[in-house]
Image (cartoon, rainbow, N blue to C red):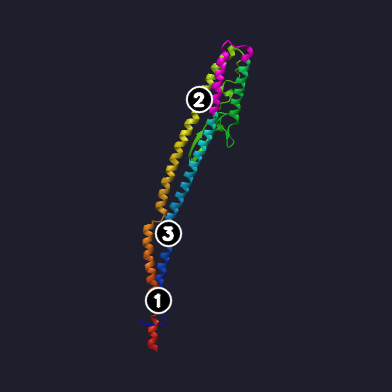
């Protein structure tokens, strides 16, 4: 029906052109952002899943950083204990030297002075070594334990150790006499065993934290892959849709132009 009051063909063409432009705009938004889901209207359920996964990924990444920091802390402590190891070896060497009867009292006194200084240094290192104000070498109390956290309900507790001269059982030893030196020789040997046990605990905790660090990074990587499948745009598919929407938009513009010219036919009849 030829009418001039209501141009229904133009209305219909304009409506379809608007839909094509909306689809074209959505394709451009997805391709420019790289995301299939840019707002809740794109995929409400997918958006909810994606945000939960992003939160889990953030927790996993931070957990991996926590494990790395824990390893750094243990490396600091273990490095200090390696120096204590060298001091104990030298103390045992001095004790063996002072145990023989071929040295004078004055010479043995010189050995004892070095021995006492090394002992004091062991205690100083144990008390002054810290990581972010955390002391791990001067107390075996559970209150000084460090808990490395990896997420909800997941953590590893790193126990502190005590490698001061007193804790190692050598605080009262001396090399003033041959008999004292022989006693010190045995006690320093026991101290080395205690120190080795404490140092070994640092070593296997570092290995455990390293394994945790690797697992957390792998988990985060897999979660990112899952999140990508939900959220990221498929460029090939979206480019096909973009081309389709461009053609429909161009066709819609052309048809709207044609529809707007239809009332001119009615005007010719009126003329």
Q: Which mark is residue 240?
A: none
The reply to whether residue 125 is in sight is yes
Assign a secondary structure to mark 1.
helix
Relative to the observer, which residue lies in front, 117 or 48?
Answer: 117
Can you identify the residue that label 2 sits on?
196
Does label 1 or label 3 sit earlier along the sequence?
A: 3
Q: Position of residue 167 (x, y in %)?
A: 57, 24
Quarter holding the C terminus is bottom left
Can you identify the residue that label 3 sits on?
31
Q: Residues within 10 Å of mark 2 (few under 14, many from 20)?
A: some
Q: Position of residue 165 (x, y in %)?
A: 58, 23
Q: Position of residue 189 (x, y in %)?
A: 53, 19
Does label 2 or label 3 sit earlier along the sequence?
A: 3
For the record, the magenta segment spans: 81-108
Does the segment drawn in magenta span residue 261? no
> Which residue is at the far top?
101
Q: Are marks 2 and 3 in contact (CB under 8 Å)?
A: no
Can you identify the residue that label 1 sits on?
257
Quarter holding the N terminus is bottom left
Q: Position of residue 236 (x, y in %)?
A: 37, 58
Marks 2 and 3 sit apart, C-alpha to C-alpha, by 60 Å
Assign a secondary structure to mark 3.
helix
Does label 2 or label 1 sit earlier along the sequence?
A: 2
């Amino acid at each position: 029906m030829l009418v001039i009051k209501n141009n229904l063909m133009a209305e219909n063409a304009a409506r379809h052109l608007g839909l094509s432009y909306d689809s074209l705009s959505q394709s451009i938004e997805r391709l420019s952002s790289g995301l299939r889901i840019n707002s809740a209207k794109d995929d409400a359920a997918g958006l909810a899943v994606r945000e939960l996964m992003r939160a889990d990924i953030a927790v996993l990444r931070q957990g991996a950083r926590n494990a790395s920091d824990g390893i750094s802390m243990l490396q600091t402590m273990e490095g200090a204990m390696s120096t204590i190891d060298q001091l104990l070896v030298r103390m045992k060497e001095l004790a063996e030297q002072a145990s023989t009867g071929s040295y004078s009292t004055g010479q043995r006194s010189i050995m004892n002075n070095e021995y006492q200084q090394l002992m004091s240094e062991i205690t100083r290192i144990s008390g002054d070594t810290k990581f972010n104000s955390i002391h791990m070498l001067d107390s075996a109390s559970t209150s000084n334990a460090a808990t490395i956290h990896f997420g909800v309900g997941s953590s590893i507790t790193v126990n502190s150790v005590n490698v001061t001269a007193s804790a190692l059982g050598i605080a009262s030893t001396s090399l003033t006499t041959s008999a004292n030196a022989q006693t010190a020789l045995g006690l320093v040997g026991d101290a080395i065993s205690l120190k080795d046990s404490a140092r070994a605990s640092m070593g296997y905790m570092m290995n455990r934290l390293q394994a945790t660090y690797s697992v957390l990074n792998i988990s985060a990587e897999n979660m990112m892959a899952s999140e990508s499948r939900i959220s990221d745009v498929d460029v090939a598919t979206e480019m096909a849709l973009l081309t389709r929407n461009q053609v429909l938009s161009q066709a819609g513009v052309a048809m709207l132009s044609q529809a707007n010219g239809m009332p001119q036919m009615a005007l010719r009849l009126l003329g």
